[in-house]
Image (cartoon, helix red, strand yellow):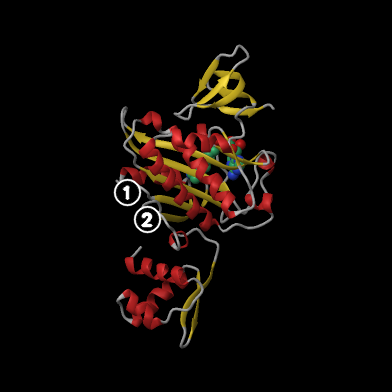
Amino acid sequence: QSPTRKKILEIFTNKQNEFVSGEELAKLLGCSRTAVWKHIEELRKEGFQLEALRKKGYRIIDTKDRVSENEIQLGLKTKKLGCTIYYVESIDSTQKLAHSLVQDGCPEGTIVVAEEQLNGRGRLARTWFSPKYSGIWMSVILRPTLPPKMSPQFTLIAAIAVVQAIAENTTLHPEIKWPNDILINGKKVSGILTELQADSDKVHAIIIGIGINVNQKQFPDELKQIATSLFIESGKETKRSHLIQAILEKIETYYQIYMEKGFAPLKLLWESYAVSIGKDIIAHTLNGDIIGKAIGITDEGVLKLEDQDEKVHLIYSADIEIQS
Ligand code: BTX
């Protein structure tokens, strides 16, 4: 994105619904009126609806619900996250593109967003249903200097950000099911997949994949019982780009806290949104099932499960079934 273009969007954001004259725009941008007009035409082509009135100038009246680079950057208040955006209409998986961008040396804070994924992925090679124009299918690339064993905590940080962003943009109050599901009324509205590129002792990049069902009106039969969307739960459409902005802003804030103070200050916040804590659960792990009460998470974000002999098991990875 050119600096001029970014500046134009900033000017319109600051003016909110007011008109900005061509002359003023030219002055603020330090370019000719013809150049201003060309930028305006390009924004129009991308779907921005710009009203132009003689003597008054231009204003953005509305934007189509797309999650393009411009839509996300218009009004985004982050320092790093989302400064570089790869936006695609259709892709196999945003995670896959993010992995190749990491190998090409992309900067921290780069994000990949798609309108649709044809082969969206969940954990353990499961698929993630990602239909066009209705959800958020996004990968966020971070490059912390950390040992790889800390990476699961990023799932928890992202979950806090998603829950808060949904609560701010809707009337809903989602809950977190450890480790990576966000639920509303017991159904999955969002899933997070954290992957990494690392040596044995050092992370090169953490790629946080976030899927959110936003405006879907229905689900295929195989997902009906377990999945929901913000629209189904609230009866209202939510603007996806605003939700993305809120998520990026919150991840940035919590990421900074995490790098300065570790996970401990975020633990209480995470637990306050967690649905499984204090409940009897079955943890389906790769080494079999463990039954007990979820009593909390450690400062590292590992689930603590107390069995009936009061033995505490540390669960690093599992699917959780809540019994009561
Ligand atoms: P998970 O393994 O915890 O959940 C996957 C399971 O969730 C599936 O097996 C299916 O039962 C159910 N499921 C599939 N699609 C949906 C859906 N849209 N809503 C609710 N439930 C569903 C969760 O994995 C992690 C998902 C991360 C998705 C993001 S999207 C952006 C990024 N790119 C990518 O390919 N994956 C991530």
Q: 202 above or below 90? A: above
- Viewer-side residue, 235 vs 120: 235
Sequence-wise, the earlier of marks 2 and 1 is: 2
Task: Determine the secondary structure under disc 2.
Answer: loop
Name the residue located 39 percent from the left edge and 74 percent from the top edge: 39
Q: Is residue 59 visible?
A: yes
Q: Quadrant of the C terminus?
A: top right
Name the residue located 32 percent from the left edge and 48 percent from the top edge: 106
The yes-or-no answer for disc 1 within 8 Å of ligand 1 is no
Q: Quadrant of ligand 1?
A: top right
Identify the residue under disc 1: 107
**Which x, y percent locates residue 135?**
56, 51
- Viewer-side residue, 82 vs 121: 82
Q: 46 above or below 238? A: below
Q: Is residue 120 visible?
A: no
**Which x, y percent locates residue 206?**
39, 39
Q: Amino acid at mark 1?
A: Pro
Q: Where on the picture, by quarter, is residue 74?
A: bottom left
Q: 245 above or below 53? A: above
Identify the residue under disc 2: 83
Structural distance between the alpha carbons of marks 2 and 1: 9 Å
- Viewer-side residue, 105 vs 144: 144
The yes-or-no answer for disc 2 within 8 Å of ligand 1 is no
- Viewer-side residue, 32 vs 103: 32
Q: Amino acid at mark 2?
A: Cys
Dot 2 and dot 1 residues touching (CB under 8 Å): yes
- Categorize mark 1 by other alpha carbons within 10 Å: few (<14), some (14-19), many (20+): some
Name the residue located 34 percent from the left edge and 69 percent from the top edge: 4
**Which x, y percent locates residue 176?**
58, 37
